[in-house]
Image: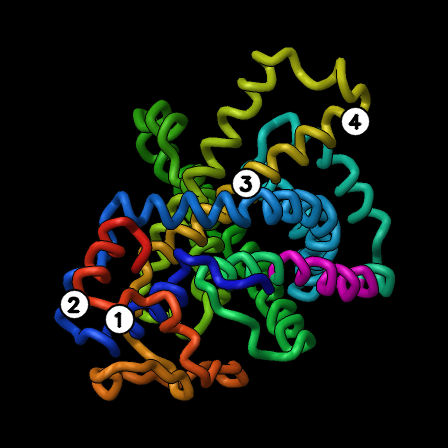
Amino acid sequence: MKDLSPQSPEARRKRLAAVKARFGSQVVERIKPGTRPFEVAKRVAIGVYSDGFIHAGNIAYLSLLSMFPFFILAAAMAQLFGSSDGAQQAVFNVLRSLPPDIAAVIRDPIREVLTARQGPLLWFGAIVGLWTASGFIETIRDILRRAYGVKYTKPFWEYRLLSALFMLGLVLLLMIALASTVLLSSIEAFIVAKVPGLADVAGTITLVRLVPGAALYLTIYLTFVVLTPSRYRKIHCRKWPGALLVTSWWVGTATLLPKVIALAGGYSLTYGSLAGVMIALLFFFIIGLGVVMGAELNAGLAESGATALEGEQYAGPHAASLDVEEPEPGEKVTAKPSQVEEVPATEREAVDAAEKGKIA
């Protein structure tokens, strides 16, 4: 992992801790910018510029790579619960959240794969799919850790096992969303049958259409909650703004991308028969940018204050007044006072540096 971003919560925590150790809590309160809109926007912009395009490309690749294994895993889970057509319904529900051109490209190949895999072959594909799809979760974990500036603290296999378990949870959430859709469809049909005058209203505003969006938001929110580093998995470190941003970004992209491509004349003249695949990659690349933006937004809003981790050393007359927290299990804490190298020498210089955006 590269050096911490100067705008990550961890980097801001270390700078504030160094300032508090040297000048006291009153100076920290004067220079701490908090969550002012301009400061948060700057943090998000720097984070997206630094890591956004790399991770967006990785997400675009892994989305196509993991999609088929994910549905194979869903088919195995549906068979386990005794629903033979559960995977087909899962495909339909997921494709509803994609632009029509992309859904048309991948719908038939996915159905062919699900039809061909039966019995032991299905379960073998589910095991392979679980490993492949968990790599997608690991990418999002890396995005969040880089956004918060927290390094990895556990062995690779432990993270991968947790990602596999989390992927199973996402499949179960998808099944619950499908069951909710069926239930709400039945309720809607019952209401329309009893009150025929509501048929036109139900055709325009229906609970069933809200389920995919709500499931998408809940999935992203749970992903952020579970994969965010434990130090920032606190109640006051909000996760819903990033989840709402990603959900809105997803829905907006799915709505506007086909229109933009149509205005540009389409991709068929450039990519020929591969136009559908290229549009899918473009869609998931834009979604990847949205995921990075959501992670950086949550990280930009996170404030841990002038807190030191046990094992960190800060020089100054007020070092003993620092609040100390336990590091994550397995986290390596730097013992030498390297965090104070760029701290201004005087209180006035600290305030001036904060006004110029060099501190906090």
Q: Which mark is residue 27?
A: 2
| The magenta stretch spans residue 235 | no
Q: Is residue 167 left or right of residue 22?
A: right
Q: Is residue 262 left or right of residue 196?
A: right
Q: Which residue is mark 3?
A: 287
- Label the magenta part by its dominant secondary structure: helix
The kind of residue on which mark 4 rests is Leu
Front residue of 307/125: it is 307
Tag 4, which secondary structure? helix
The kind of residue on which mark 3 rests is Ile
| The magenta stretch spans residue 132 | yes
Q: Position of residue 237 (x, y in %)?
A: 32, 64
Q: Which residues are magenta?
A: 123-137
Q: Which mark is residue 19?
A: 1
The kind of residue on which mark 2 rests is Val
Q: Which mark is residue 274?
A: 4
Q: Position of residue 239 (x, y in %)?
A: 37, 58
Name the image quarter holding residue 96: top right
Pointer 2 local density, CA inside 10 Å: few below 14, some 14–19, many at least 20: some
Quadrant housing the C terminus:
bottom left
